[in-house]
Amino acid sequence: MSMGKGDTSWFVQDRFGLFIHWGLYAQGARHEWLMANEKISVEEYERRYFKRFYPDLYNPELWAKAASNAGMKYFVVTTKHHEGFCLWDSQFTDYKATNTAIGKDLLTPMVNAFRNEGLRTGFYYSVIDWHHPENFIDNRFGPYRELPAEEMAKMNAGRTQAKYAEYMRNQVRELLTRFGKVDVMWFDFSYPPPKEFPADDFSKGKGRLAWESEKLYAMVRELMPSVIVDDRLDLPDAWDIKTPEQWQPREWYTHEGQRVVWEACQTLSGSWGYHRDEMTWRSSDELIRTLIDCVSKGGNLLLNVGPTGRGEFDERALSRLEDIGEWMKRHQRSIYGCTQAPDEFKAPENCKLTYNPQTKRLYVHVFAWPAYGTLYLDGISDRVEYAQLLHDASEVKFEMPPAWQGGTQSSANTLNLRLPANEPKVAVPVIELFLK
Ligand code: GLC
């Protein structure tokens, strides 16, 4: 189920996408929020990073190859992040890639490269903008958030929020008319003023009133009826997907009691933008388990890479994408077209289930290889026709609980899968069960 009108039919099949956070912050190389974190003024930020931006090694074909080899089916790129800088040649601002040292539109070749690799296109667009001169400064986020009230009021004196809202519509219109079919429009993010303040006091926060979200959303729908829109415009009833960020829901994401289409977004190391010194990189195995976790709960994973200021995926990102691809090559059948298993199937200890309703196959992802090589699967004994390890199509024998076991070990409905004693040399072994 989804609340909006976008076409999510492909999305719930494809399951795995690449998030790209790329902007001037790549040069700071210490988080895409550095402008806010370090309270860098607009002038200073421009001086340091804008003119200097020179991604001379940028080759989007390599990015697209890396993503498609990892098994990703769509990508979502920050066309503009909170810093306000635009990757494309927008006619509504000078703060764009064409005016940097590299002097060219960086978005068009990216879209072309990913499309050529067969991936679908998504645009992230930050409604937050710490650079635009008409956008109100508020005391919540951004480099000026801690200014004394009078100083902030002075900075806001000449600003007209409605002009910024119009600027956004103009830009989003460009994004939806100049680049062919856009499959995902990913807005980020809203933080309306707290209840005790007037809803239109934009110095206390910004939500649907500040962004004129209703107009923006209506325009998006009109220009690109099928596009999937995320849930961050502060519009309770106009979104297609829920977007848990940096956490995994414990079960299928629900909204008002209904299961909804959802996509977790996760980083490789904590920061979204390129971060040179971050040492908290997640292992490939853990990232693979995260993808499985999403699908086992009916969701997608949007996994982020922050390319460098020279325009490359760094070695740490590439090696993880390669590892994921190595696994996906042999296990994609348990991901694409799959979803949460019907309730009657209970995941065995240390396992996650996914299910393909079309082919009626159940996939058991074994996160920890069982002692003595037996996996007990409750609730399905009479439904299984055949079982095999997915990576090498080697048969897995199974049996109903033998009489001598009985008791607390297994019930009449328990299937005993006889796994090899040695764990297969893959990141996460998967057993494919062909159901009757
Ligand atoms: C956030 C952050 C951010 C990142 C993102 C991705 O709320 O502000 O930097 O782009 O969401 O979900």
Image (cartoon, rainbow, N blue to C red):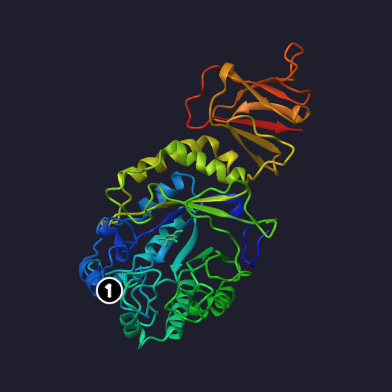
Badge 1 marks a residue whose secondary structure is: helix
Nearest the viewer among 45 and 169 is 45
Q: Is residue 346 above or below residue 24?
A: above
Q: Name, please, the residue furthest toward the front.
A: 196
Image coordinates of residue 189 in percent, x first then y, are 47, 67
Residue visible at 52% across and 44% down in the picture: 291
Q: Mark 1 highlights which residue?
A: 42
- Image quarter of the C terminus: top right
Which quadrant of the figure shows ligand 1?
A: bottom left
From the viewer's side, name the closer residue of 62 and 261.
261
Q: Position of residue 411 (x, y in %)?
A: 76, 23
Residue 191 place in picture, x, y as percent: 48, 69
Residue type beneath disc 1: Val
Q: Is mark 1 within 8 Å of ligand 1?
A: no
The reply, left or right, for residue 41 in relation to residue 423 is left
How many numbered discs, if any? Answer: 1
Residue at 37% over, 70% down: 88
**Residue 366 in which image quadrant:** top right
The quarter of the picture where residue 79 lies is: bottom left
Q: Residue furthest top?
A: 404
The N terminus - image quarter = bottom right
What residue is rendered at 74% in x and 11% in y?
404
Q: Residues within 10 Å of mark 1 (few under 14, many from 20)?
A: some
List x then y, in percent, for residue 40.
Answer: 26, 68
